[in-house]
Image: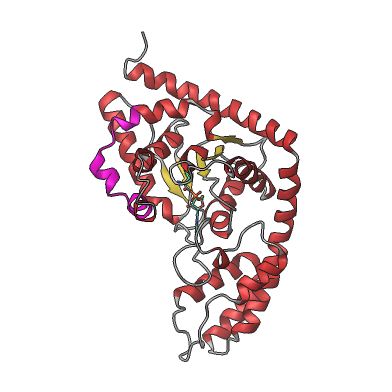
Amino acid sequence: MKKETVLSGIRPTGYLHLGNYFGAMRNYVKMQDTYNCYFFVANWHSLTTHPDTKALQESVYRVIAENVACGLDPDKVALYVQSDVPEIAELYLYLNMLAYKGELEKTTTFKDKAKLQPDNINAGLLTYPVLMAADILIHRAVKVPVGKDQEQHLEMARNFAERFNFRYGHIFPEPHAFNFGDNLIKIMSLDGNGKMSKSENQMATIFLADEDDIIRKKIMKAKTDSGPTVPNSLKPDYIENLFTLMKIVSKAEVYDTFDEDYNQCNIRYGDFKKQLAEDMVAFIQPIREKAAAIQNDKAALHQMMKQGAEKARESANATLQEVRKAIRMIY
Ligand code: TYM
C-alpha cells in the first residue's frame, strides 16, 4: 500500500521551544517510520516578519540541527530548506490567483502581525497562507502535523486546493492538520499570557537550547496561585499547562501523585515546580547537547540539506508538471 504523505514546516525566526516540540516535532519523529515525510525550514516565510537576514542563516542551521537532535532521521524523511526548492515559488504564484484579498485580510495571524508591525504590512505577510498552501500542496500532502495556532491556515490551504481542483481538474488531495491525540496542541506561556513563542516573552518560554539553570529559574517563576480549595476542581489554564508539561517529561506515577494532591487540595506548588524543573532539565539536556554538536558540523549539515532538497525537488517537480499541464502552461 502506498504510504500517505506528510508535510510540515518551522520558521527559523528564533530558538525552538517546548511549543514547537510538543505541537509539531514530537509528531514528526513518530510519523517518520510509517509515512512518506517532508519536513522543512520555512526561511521564505521568515522574511515576512524578519527582513534582517543576518541571524537567519545560523537559525536555519539550528532548526535543522534541533530537528535531528529530537530524533528526525534525514535518511528516512526529506529534511530540507524551503528556498532550496524553487518549485514551491511557482506553485505559490498560481495559487495567488485563486486567493482573494478579503479572505487574506481576515486571517487571524495577518491581523495580529499587522498590528505588531504597522510599518511593514507587506504583500508577503498578506499572502503568507498562500505560500503555506504551496508548501503543502507541492507534495500533495494529506497530513500536516502542526500546533493549534496553524488550524486556520490549514483550512485556507484546503480552500485553495479545492478551488484549483474545481477550475483546472483534480490534482490536489485535501490536507488536514494532524496530531496523535484528538486535539491540536497549544503550549501556553509560563506566565499564563498567550502561547509559548519564539520571539515574545522569552522568560516565559522554555527553549530547547536553554541551559539547566535557566530552565530551573523559568519553571520556578511560572505562574501559580494559592491552590484549590474545593476537591476535584477544574484546573485554571496556566496550572493545566504545567500539568501538561509534567505529563510529557515526568514519569506517570510522579504525574499521578501531584494530580491526586491537586484533587485533594494538598498540592504544594513549590515541590511540584521543583520536580517539574528537574524532569525538564533531564529531558532537554541531551537534546541541547546533541543539537549543538550537529550545528557545529557544517559539512554534515550541508550534506543533510542537499540530500533533503534533492528528495523534495523530485516530488515537487512531479506535482508541478501535473499543475502546468492542468493549467495549460506547457507549450
Ligand atoms: P512556527 O514556526 O510558528 O511553529 C512551528 C510549529 O510549532 C507549532 N507551535 C506550537 N504548538 C503548540 N504550542 C505552541 N505554543 C506552539 N508554538 C508553535 C506550530 O503550530 C507549528 O506546527 N506557518 C508555520 C510554518 C509553516 C508550515 C508550512 C507549517 C510554513 N509552511 C506548511 C506546516 C505546513 C509556522 O509559522 O510555524
List x then y, in percent, for residue 298: 72, 37
* Residue at image location 39% in from the left, 31% down from the top: 92
Q: Is residue 66 inside the magenta stretch?
A: no
Residue 118 to residue 298: above or below: below
Query: Nearest the camera: 238 or 292?
Result: 292
Measuring from the top left, give residue 81's x and y in whole percent: 57, 35
- 116 or 102, nearer to the observer: 116
Residue lying furthest front in this view? 119
Question: On the rendered image, what quadrant is the C terminus found in?
Answer: top left
Q: Which residues are magenta?
A: 94-113
Q: Residue at x 67, y 40 (%)?
A: 73
The residue depicted at 64 percent of the width and 33 percent of the height is 305
Which x, y percent locates residue 276?
65, 73
Horizontal side of residue 90 vs 3, given as left or right: left
Of 259 and 104, the residue lying toward us: 104
Position of residue 147 measured from the top left corner of the image (x, y, whole percent): 47, 54
Q: Is residue 277 above or below residue 12?
A: below
Q: How is the image coloured?
A: secondary structure
Q: Is residue 197 left or right of residue 99?
A: right
Quarter of the view holding residue 289: bottom right
Q: Give the total of numbered labels.
A: 0
Outermost residue toward the top? 331
Task: Assign the magenta stretch its main secondary structure.
Answer: helix
Q: Classify residue 215 by image quadrant.
A: bottom right
Residue 253 visible from this viewpoint: no
Query: Residue 108 colored magenta?
Result: yes
Vertical order, 41 against 276 (above or below) = above
* Left or right: 78 in relation to 294: left
